[in-house]
Amino acid sequence: MDYLQINPEQLSPLTIELISLAAFAALVLLFTLMPSLNLIIKSSKIKRKRKTEQNFDYEGISIIVISGFHTDCLRACVENIYSQNTQQPVEIIIVNTNGEEHTEYAIKMLQADYPEIKHTFVPIQSRHLSKRKLAITLGIKAASYPIVLFTTANIIPKTEGWLESVMSRFKNGADIVIGTTVLRNVKTGETVGKIRAFDSVKALLRRIPAALKGSPVGADSANLAYRKKLFFNNKGFSDTLNLNYGDDDIFISEIAKNHRVAVDISKDSVLTLHEENPKQVYDIERKSRLFTQSKLRRTPFITSGIQDILWWVWLLSSIAAIFFGLPSLLPAVCIFVIAIFLIVPLSIRWRKVTKILSLPYHTLILPFLSLINPFIYLRYKINFGRKPRNYTWQN
């Protein structure tokens, strides 16, 4: 029991410094991660205001569906959109990015039942242009309403309140509304796995605070809306024609200047993307974002990198404090208290965020994934460097 007595002479100066370093790292992690996690949770609980205004102008929304690889999902996508519970005038514009005959046939079959649907296509000859950018440009030019929302054919809304949730942000004065999606295997119903789920939350921790400050560093191209005039005021994609993902990263960062950005991750607005191989789709998207990351505001990425380092500072200083504190058990008790103080509140908040996004998570997995995350990122960077391919052109 003498080993547990609180006696300053019992601990060496080095042990005390190591305990202090572990506590410092834990405090910094808490004070940087907790506000962002709470912000995500708060954003998911934003309630729409009741329509008390008698002369509210229902602006209308043009939904641009980028299709090319999910032709078999088109009908379900259109039916899901039309089943949304909203008073906004809605139009659907389908853009065929591949110009293939079977996609054109599927669209014509849809128009037989829904003649109001508009459609256009990206010419097959457009090999030296970004198909995605061209598809978005064509869709916006065909849009009749002042608000445009971009999505893909394989989306499935969780509820019938998706469009109303998005439009509520515009009613409250937003010019850009950033939503989110969750990848899911179309056959098994499984998501992308724990490591990629962790990475998804890390991305949100960078995106949401930055977006709410008016300087977004990314957006989800399958659940993104903004006022059409912003596109033309920015002269479209004139500054990012060589990058396919500039529309949801660099482009959004550009048009957000002096405009209000809203984030919508409520349970109504999170979309499910059904893919045959969601892990492969996620990896390609991550590599494409590595290509554009250097062109965005650096602060959120630097903060995320510092957090990764602090996890290792906390772990190594904790192990060292216990080792150099032997035979006393007091350092181990101090390190245990610090660990509980750090891991428990973060794990509770992290679990709530993964629940919002319907992503997998197990208790106490957060420290492990936080520690290996720098190596996962390094692996992506190395693989990307070995094959210096412009993944942003992959569509």
Image (spheres, rainbow, N blue to C red):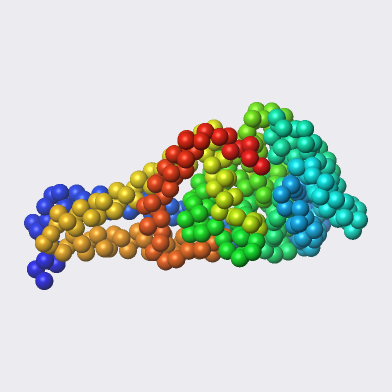
Residue 107 seen: no
Residue at 80%, 61% in the rendered image: 79
Q: Residue at x 57, y 45 (%)?
A: 284
Identity of the residue drawn at 58% across and 38% down? 391
Quarter occupied by residue 378: top left
Q: Above or below — where is 149 with respect to 78?
A: above
Which residue lies at the image location 74% right of the left edge and 47% below the top edge?
68
> Looking at the figure, which quarter contains the C terminus?
top right
Given residues 369 and 11, the one toward you in this image is 369
Q: How many marks?
A: 0
Q: Quadrant of the N terminus?
A: bottom left
Residue 311 locus on image (x, y percent): 34, 51
Q: Is residue 121 visible?
A: yes
Q: Position of residue 224 (x, y in %)?
A: 67, 47
Q: Is residue 366 above or below residue 18?
A: below
- Locate residue 109, reporting x and y percent: 87, 55
Q: Between residues 341 and 221, which one lies in front from this camera angle?
A: 221
